[in-house]
Image: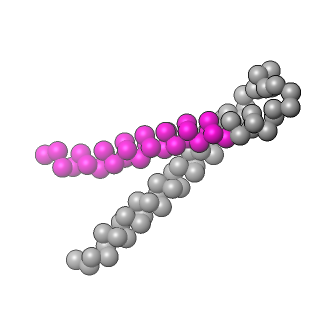
Amino acid sequence: MDSSFGLSTIGYTALVGMISHLLFIYITWRVITTINFDPLIRKGRETEARILIIFIAIVIGTGVSRFILDFVQWSLNLQYLF
């Protein structure tokens, strides 16, 4: 077996992880922007509120992505149970 096979697998895993994180961050951002935060935002603080929404989307999206990726990995590892 070629030793580059392992490195290739690591590369694909990294690529899938990056795409998954970005996808779930984008989905979370789309969902969060449907919520009306205007009553909670102080006048003159719109930029800070947008940055906060982006950070919240990153935290939630990354958490969901990590859960999905872990669940898939656990499912693949079930073959080693028996």
Up-down relation of residue 26 to residue 37 (above or below) = below
x, y percent for residue 30: 68, 40
Residue furthest toward the top? 39
Judged left or right of residue 9, residue 64 is right
Q: Position of residue 14 (x, y in %)?
A: 44, 60
- Name the residue rendered at 34%, 70% in the picture: 7
78 in the magenta segment: yes
Instruction: Decide whether the magenta segment is chiefly helix, strand or loop.
Output: helix
Observer-nearest residue: 15 or 72?
Answer: 15
Q: Would residue 50 appear left or right of 80 to someone viewing this image? A: right
- Decide if residue 8 is on the left or right side of residue 49: left
Q: Where does residue 11 sit, x and y in percent of width and height?
A: 41, 66
Identify which residue is drawn at 18% across, 49% down: 80
Extreme residue in the left direction: 82
**From this viewpoint, is residue 22 visible?**
yes
**Residue shown at 63%/39% (left/top)?**
55
The quadrant in which residue 1 appears is bottom left
Q: Which residues are magenta?
A: 53-82
Residue 4 occupies which quadrant of the picture?
A: bottom left
16 falls in the magenta region:
no
Image-based side of 16 in relation to 73, left or right: right
Q: Residue at x 81, y 32 (%)?
A: 45
Name of the residue lying farthest toward the right: 43
Near-viewer residue (49 or 7): 49
Colouring style: one colour
User: Does residue 30 appear in this view?
Assistant: no
